Amino acid sequence: MFGGDADGVMSAGGSGRVSDGCRAELLHGDDLVGETAALLREHLRVPGMGETTARYFRDKLAMRVRARNQGILVPDFVAVVNDDAINRFADNVALPWMLKPRSNAAAIGIHRIEKRDDLWPTIDGLGDQRSFYVLEQYFNLNFQFYGRQLKFFCVQPEGGSIAQEQAAAALADSYGVYGAMFASTVGCAEYTRMKMVSICEGLQDGQYAEASPYKWASFETETMQDEMVVEYVCKKLAGKKADYAGSPDLQSRQRKFGIITYDNRDFGGGVPLITKGIKACGGGDVKVVFATVGTDTAEGSAQLASAATQFQQDHVTTVIPLMDVIADFAAYPEWAKGVKQG
């Protein structure tokens, strides 16, 4: 998709017409759609990740050049553009080689070159598409690690309490691991304190910046998600009757919003953004209730029951959970769970 062709822009962007007051915001949930989103941001001049940055996540040549320039070891490679450079690669890099599409996912379109004589016929068979490929050394033919070791550890806390998650992070540290994948916010805080790299749940933009280079995101940040919450509530829910509430009395009322979230797990960082945004679009004041423990404990269930009482007293019809809620609210309010759930 990279390349900015007119057909790609038109097929992804439709007619390209918008009305006054419309705001274009392009988000993507996986790496395949990321190319299209980046292309449209460039074409429509919408803020966000453009093609140059997006290529570091999708373009195999861009990834390798960037990694090598940053001092990260990568298998030898060459762009399939200059014939002399390709021949120098073939003269100096041991077989086998991999001829890979620069943008396809997984193993789609990959050619494995076992013999030197097969190289140029394979490249020539690509025709004008050859520049969209990268030729690289087949790495780890026999799973060599050259003296290094790669170990995977699975550490699972017994429950959702902060103490248990902190203990799990400490155990991971005792193994001497380099980093952690998809850690909770509590775990990420511990890993950052230990100077370990971790892939964290959605946090505010500022939290990633403050913890650089240890905290990383694999999907939209919480700031982006909170902005989507505000936009969805303002466009779809605010100013309308609470049709899906659990009682006829609430269903007859105009929606009043409430939020339940943790105040000690970095989950509540977006509350000011959400409450201010909802109020600005006419959604009124938002009732916010904080929890301090996981809802999978007796104390957590009690806090959730208390939250339900507070929401009822404030005539809240629609609750936006910014945390995992598993206890029963007796189906009393509407749940805006599809908007965002921590």
Image (tube, rainbow, N blue to C red):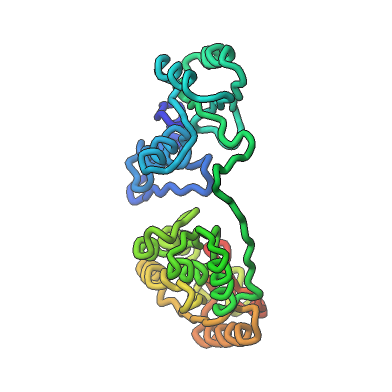
**Picture quarter with the C terminus:** bottom right
Q: Quadrant of residue 248?
A: bottom right
Q: Is residue 239 visible?
A: no
Of residues 339 and 14, the one nearer the viewer is 339
171 relative to 70 in the view: left or right: right
* Residue 81 pos. (x, y %): 42, 19
* Residue 64 pos. (x, y %): 44, 36
Q: Residue furthest front?
A: 147
Using the image, determine if residue 245 lies above or below residue 1. below
Instruction: Give the residue at x 61% y 69%.
Output: 244
Using the image, determine if residue 16 lies above or below residue 158. above
Using the image, determine if residue 91 lies above or below residue 41. above
Count of numbered circles on the image: 0
Of residues 326 and 252, the one nearer the viewer is 326
Q: Is residue 96 visible?
A: yes
Using the image, determine if residue 68 lies above or below residue 316. above
281 relative to 98 in the view: left or right: left
128 relative to 110 in the view: left or right: left
* Residue 222 pos. (x, y %): 44, 62
Of residues 273 and 280, the one nearer the viewer is 273
Instruction: Give the residue at x 43% y 19%.
Output: 88
* Residue 217 pos. (x, y %): 46, 56
Q: Quadrant of residue 251?
A: bottom right
